[in-house]
Image: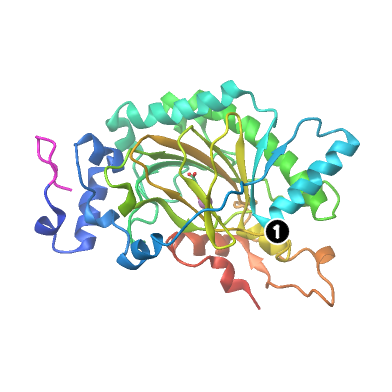
Amino acid sequence: MSLSNTGEIASPTSVYNNRTEELKAFDDTKAGVKGLVDAGIVSIPKIFVRPPEELAEERNSCQKNIEVPIIDLNNIQEGSRRKEIVDEVRIASEKWGFFLVINHGIPLSVLDEMIDGVRMFNEHDVEVKKEVYSRDTTKKVRFNANYDLYKSRAANWRDTLTISLLAVDLDPELLPVVCRKSTLEYVKHIRKLGDTLFELLSEALGLQADYLGSMECGKEGTLVCHYYPACPQPKLTLGVSRHVDPGFLTLLIQNEISGLQVLHEGQWFDVHPIQGGLVVNIGDLLQIVSNDKFKSVEHRVIANHVGPRISAPCFFAGPLSMPEKTYNPIQELTSEANPPRYKEIPLREYVARFYSSSLDEKSPLDYYRP
Ligand code: OGA
Ligand code: NI
């Protein structure tokens, strides 16, 4: 991207011969989307503009007055209340693939500090961000704008710090200093909440509480810290293109700025932030092992005139470091009348498939239907 000293940005069409060249110039700044905003752009570069057919379709969308389910985890160990919670989890996982949890036991201060840490990392010092800027997926901590920048049809308006923090051997020193303490503290809590949710989900599938846990669904994964700067032309782009999440389960914290939307009965619904609430959604792998009982549902993030929006989804993706791990629809959930709807899935291959495609392509799940 050619940014002049006056903070102006040259018109992309007059400077670049093609899209790839423009993407590369932007990537080479290593300053991400925030770098563009800091340079004072008033119109978004062409690489971020959604395809015309998508923009045209958008005008037809409308919203009904129903909300994503909110599940109160208070008194979760009390027999009759637990039964109700399990029922609520089952219905939400079957019908929405999304729900919010409140009274989940993570202190508000831990949530606030996590968000602040992400904000500080993005706003402190661009040189620190440049040092960790990378597209090398073997790096346990990496910062970039759009992991699929060169593959997607339109770039998204966000920057991301990705942390393979659930890997047992992550060296905390790899984490940026400004968000190290807050992130480590948050991860400790989110792992525990992950265990609780896998128990509830197991029970909601009619299985023993430790079933999904013993399949190691929550064992490893990735914490992804998104920073969505205010956008001068939010209608032309997206914060995250529509997609489904690849892992088993996603637990997401977000700041007070809306943007996340879930597709339900053919309409986009806002997943409004609520104080202290965390968003939970079913990923493709859980849809697979549940033999389609639980739904991995499409969602996206719209761009906004105000910002920054900050979010941090934690993707529980199973034991990625075990090369031979495979998954199948759970036997107890299949029968002659309801045969397995997926072939055996090698976890490593499945994840590699995800990284080799763009977020806006169809889900890798389709490869594993018999
Ligand atoms: C994702 C995602 C939503 C958000 O990263 O997969 O859906 O609110 N993020 O940032
Ligand atoms: Ni997602």
Q: Main secondary structure of the magenta part?
A: loop
| Residue 255 colored in magenta in the image | no
Position in image of residue 305 (x %, y %) = 33, 40
Label 1, on which residue?
294
Is 15 rendered above or below residue 103? below
Position in image of residue 64 (x %, y %) = 56, 53
- Quarter holding the C terminus is bottom right
At label 1, which amino acid type do we have? Phe
Is 364 rendered above or below residue 313? below
- Mark 1: give few (<14), some (14-19) or many (20+) Cα within 10 Å: many
Position in image of residue 286 (x %, y %) = 68, 57
> Which of the two residues, 110 or 79, is positioned nearer the viewer here?
79
Residue lying at the far right of the rendered structure:
79
| Residue 2 colored in magenta in the image | yes
Residue at x 53% of width, y 59% of height = 267
> In screen coordinates, is 268 left or right of 14?
right
Residue 215 visible here: no
The boundaries of the magenta stretch are 1-9
Residue at x 28% of width, y 57% of height = 49
> Which of the two residues, 156 or 175, is positioned nearer the viewer here?
156
Position in image of residue 249 (x %, y %) = 63, 49
